[in-house]
Image: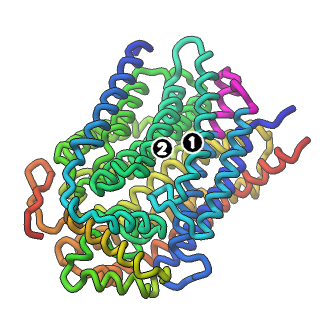
Amino acid sequence: MSTKLKRIFFWSLFLLFIAYGFFIYTSGTENDGGKRFLTEGAKRGKLLFQEYNCTSCHQLYGLGGYMGPDLTNVISAPGKGESYVKSFIKNGTQQMPNFHLGEADVNALTEYLNYVDKTGISPVRNFEVQYDGTIMQKAIQ
Amino acid sequence: MKKEVGVFFIFLSIVALLAGMFFGSLSAFQFVFPGFFDLLPFFKNRPLHVSLVVSWIFLSAIGGIYYYLPKYCGLPLFSRKMAVVHIWLFFITGLLILACYLLGKFGGREYWEFPAILAIPVFISWVLFAFNYFISVFKKIGQWPVYLWMWATGICFFLFTFLESYLWVFPYFRDNLIRDLTVQWKAYGALTGSWNMLVYGTAIFVMERIKGDESVAKSKLAFWMYFLGLTNLLFGWAHHIYIVPTVPWIRYLAYGISMTELLILSRIIWNWKSSLEEAKKDYYFLPFRFLVASDVWIFLNLILALLISIPAVNVYTHGTHITVAHAMGSAIGINTMILLSSVLFIINDVTKYTFSKIQKSIIRAGFWITNISLFAFLIFLTIAGAEKGILVIENKLSFQAIMQKISPYLVSFAWSGLGIFIGLIMTTVPPLVAIFQYLKRK
């Protein structure tokens, strides 16, 4: 394989990668189902979620740590909800430290989780397997 | 005579590996026995483990490149001083990062859990490395062997994806969870691909030196495999986010690209017999032994990677311990085995230190303890993950009920992790002593 051909391959792949990145930054991820729940409090809650390194123990969409449960739909899960979440954040558990957060921070984190809840479903429990190994999500989970 | 700058990197890398494994073992036990050693809680321990182990991979790969370029590729470093600044910058930033974790100051992102401001010196240190590398290798006349391409690719894409992983600081990315998660895993997928390029390039280089056959690294097949790996690095990451509601074509593209890894798998099986015969021949040589082990782990890990890239399988395995098994199989089984091979090769070469009979026996025993423990470690994680996946999707059990059910596997996973740590101590302490004596020499 000549050096020229290698360069052509390399730069073609690189340009495709840039174009692909552009689509991912824009139209590929434009559809945010929870947009109208993204309050100022939720925005602050996201930063708090990072500041307290919640991701080391919790997952969103199955991404993150394994010590605690996935929090994507904790707000709408049967038997859970906002007051359940607030109680955990305020008091901690044997595994989860009590970060001694003030009321405003607890509310911000809860608003953030409320926003996350509206963006989609995780884990996906109701689906149909297609012939090619892909899956089709069903509306009711 | 000035000391080889690459050896300083190697020394630091082994220290980072041992410290990273210590925190890893501690967090594994905290994971299964809540309340264990609360002085350093899990949410601080985990980032200490991740950052130190990632540092091991970077430092040992970079140290190898700094060492191999002038010594074997006939390419003197553009600036030794720049390499020295690089290691100091990396070291000081590393200490600051560790201090932040201990003080509970986080950036809260996967892999880079340190405050975002510390990304600036990390990035500068990589720019120095890139500058030094490219000015040095552009002096090369004639065809570049594939490892020079791989190292160049690894450096370029690290810089690109590292920046990309910080796009969240802009509200445009941060304020849309779907975009944020997608861009994060696009960046991380390619980022791990970029360090794999550094590591696999090192593997080809060490193999070429052991065999004394330079044609392998310039063959057509080597370049086709490189381009296949690069394509997977660039476009195959989206299996991490199959369930994130992006537009569907992102998932289909990732699925299709991931399946091209079947070509790599077929090549491994095709070459198996001849590889085994060669393995028998050079098995006495320690660096070669570690390369053989990495070959076995590549094979096993590739099968797992292919399986979890199928959406119908991924829906069960995503977010379970199977993902951890895949990551650990890659980081310990493949990357660490290759990098230990490179480390032993360099020590053998630069220090002229001859390991005593006892030291050799300790390294060999460490090799087996690490690999056997790793096998058990991955099996327990895989079983725990598979059971968790089924219990979540089919039985719809609560998190607590699931954790209770899989607890015996997780306890076994923690003990086998300790086995890996012990094996790695036995494998790396004799080399560490050899390097220490070399650095102490006047």
Left or right: where B166 falls relative to B214: left
Q: Mark 2 or mark 1, which has the lower sequence index?
A: 1
- Do labels 2 and 1 touch, CB within 8 Å? yes
Q: Toward the viewer: A90 or B338?
A: A90
In the rendered view, tell whether residue B175 sits above or below residue B232.
below
Q: Is residue A106 magenta?
A: no
Give the amino acid at mark 1. Phe
Q: Residue at x 22, y 40 (%)?
A: B253
Q: Which amino acid type is shown beneath numbered disc 2?
A: Phe
Residue plotted at (39% across, 80% down): B407
Q: Position of residue B6 (x, y in %)?
A: 70, 38
Which residue lies under the disc numbered 1?
A: B123
In percent of width and height, residue B440 lies at 87, 47
Q: Position of residue B435 (x, y in %)?
A: 77, 48
- State the image quarter where residue A4 is shown: top left
| For residue A63, side relative to residue A96 (left or right) | left
The residue at which mark 2 appears reads as B162
Q: Is residue B293 above or below residue B42?
A: above
**Which chain is indicated by disc 2?**
B
- Disc 2 residue crowd, few under 14, some 14–19, many 20+, Cα 10 Å: some
Pick the front one: A125 or A100: A100
Q: Quadrant of residue A55?
A: bottom left
Q: Is residue B372 left or right of residue A122?
A: right
Q: Which mark is residue A84?
A: none
Q: Which residues are magenta?
A: B63-81
